[in-house]
Amino acid sequence: MAHESCPACARHTERSDEQKKKLANRLSRMEGQLRGIRKMVDEDAYCYDVLMQSAAVLSALKSFNRELLRSHMDHCVVRDIRDGKPEVMDELMTILEKLM
């Protein structure tokens, strides 16, 4: 729920049911992979094997971020620029710096 005292809290992105499902499925897979890594650590699995699973989660997260970033640029950034809100470019640069 948006908070009237916080303008940034009022922002949201509408996603189709298909988009939500796709993103949720990716997150669920990563959650499962992380639980698997936790179990491997608890069971003293060989470091190499744990690192391989960790690399798989990192790759999945990067893929998730790319998909979400593409959607953000295609929809949110384009919309805000059309609506005369060029400050969205500063926001975009900030997130790109964090993702790189």
Image: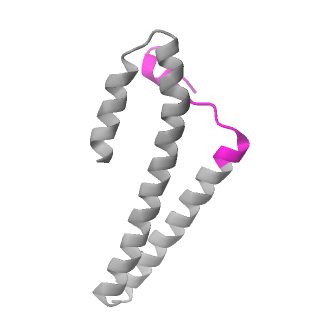
Residue at 43% x, 67% y: name it: 57
Percent of width and height locating residue 87: 36, 17
Q: Residue furthest right?
A: 17
Above or below 68: residue 86: above
Choose between 19 and 78: the one closer to the eye. 78
- 22 sits to left or right of 11: right
Q: Residue furthest top?
A: 84
Q: Is residue 93 magenta?
A: no
Residue 25 appearing in the image: yes
Quarter of the picture holding the N terminus: top right
Percent of width and height locating residue 100: 28, 48
Q: Is residue 7 magenta?
A: yes
Residue at 34% x, 37% y: name it: 95
Above or below 35: residue 95: above
Residue at 49% x, 18% y: name it: 80
- 5 sits to left or right of 29: left
Q: Which stretch appears magenta?
A: 1-20
Above or below 100: residue 56: below
